[in-house]
Image: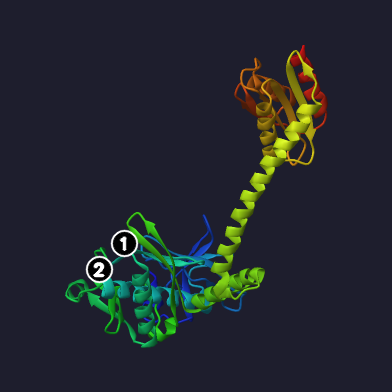
Amino acid sequence: MTKRLYYDDSFLYDFDAEIYEVLETPRPGLILDRTAFYPTSGGQVFDTGWLTPDANAKLRVTEVADAEDGRVIHYLEAARDDLKPGTRVHGEIDAARRRDHMQQHSGQHVLSAAFVRLYNIPTVSFHMADDYCSIDLDTPTLTKEQIESAERLANEIVLANRAVDIRFVTREEAGKMGLRKLPPTERDELRLIDIRDFDVTACGGTHVAHTGQIASILLRKTERVRQGWRVEFFAGLRAVATARRDFTTLTETAAMFSAHIYDVPQQARKALDEIKSLRKQYEHSQEELAAAYASVLLADAAEVHGRKVVVRTLSDRDLNFVKLLAQKVTRLFPNVVALLATTSPQPSLVFAQSPGQPFDMGALMKDVMTKTGGRGGGSKDMAQGGIPNAEGIEARLKGIAATLAA
Ligand SMILES: [Zn+2]
């Protein structure tokens, strides 16, 4: 088993060790006799860093994992053939990444304990990733007030700068201590993280020495999950970076409205109301325009055997308008067939007939689609379809009109 130096000292950023085994497949990796690198476990993600064999170039450690037999595997960015068991290496972990992980993980202990203290809500799982951290709370409901109170208490514990001690006890001793969480493993010795007079939990992770090093805990999104509620949070410098990003986003948005950032919701609501009202006006205008346009088309169309066949290709109106126009044309006059098209933005066809006309617009459309490689269809009185290009579109409509008039 690899001796885990981080168990006793989370602030040990470099160390000396000896290579115990060299792994070549499936990925190059090293097992050392001792390590300060943290392997992914208990919700906390792995450290990265460097291993330096004597007088040689630094080897980048890209991932660290627990093997089933208790050894720690250091995966290397690239394979090296001069490494063998017994080679001495100097290890150096990425201190900024470790500090961030300590802030998130200790922040999680404080936050989970705050939910227990205030509302007796237990945490059932902890997720840490590069983008955000979250805890899942076992509770059917979670209010805004509960979130704000837990956030406040957690930050008060941060401000109080309480000592965070690492203790090792037997399972029996732990059983009497009223831990927030007791792991199900059979191991006899347990490692406890003891936040003085606030929280004691069994945990193998790396933690700050005093809660002040967590710096801050910011709660963000909450969402319902299968078991209860998920709460996203950011601790330490991540909280600062997140607040900075939020401010940048808000500032950009506020600039669009020439408003103060706190007035953005009000401005956005006003703009949405305006859009809604303009859309209504626009739809009304389109209706009027389509009705007027329909009258013109009908006046121009010749009547053959008591029926008017209207053929028109529009280049400056979209499909919605053409559909509206087809409706108007076939309702203003009882015996009308409309064969309409638009060339932009997407070449499309709309066929319609007044109720009671003998043709089948859906079948007519299907036939054109088959010939042009387009997609579309419809009912007996109304059909639409999109075609790959607008070339020869007017001639095609005229051809169809001729067959209908025959
Ligand atoms: Zn933990």
Whether residue 176 sits left or right of residue 73 in the image: it is left
Q: Nearer the viewer, mark 1 or mark 2?
A: 1
Q: Residues within 10 Å of mark 1 (few under 14, many from 20)?
A: few
Reading the image, the residue beneath label 2 is 182
Residue 197: image x %, image y %?
A: 26, 84
Residue 364: image x %, image y %?
A: 68, 20
| Vertical placement of residue 181 versus 153, above or below | above
Q: Residue at x 36, y 88 (%)?
A: 160
Nearer-the-camera pick, 44 or 362: 362
Residue 188: image x %, image y %?
A: 23, 70
Q: CA distance from mark 1 to mark 2?
A: 25 Å
For badge 2, the amino acid type reads Leu
For badge 1, the amino acid type reads Thr
- Label 2 residue SS: loop
Nearer-the-camera pick, 153 or 178: 153
Q: Earlier in the sequence, mark 1 or mark 2?
A: 1
Nearer-the-camera pick, 57 or 297: 297
Reading the image, the residue beneath label 1 is 141
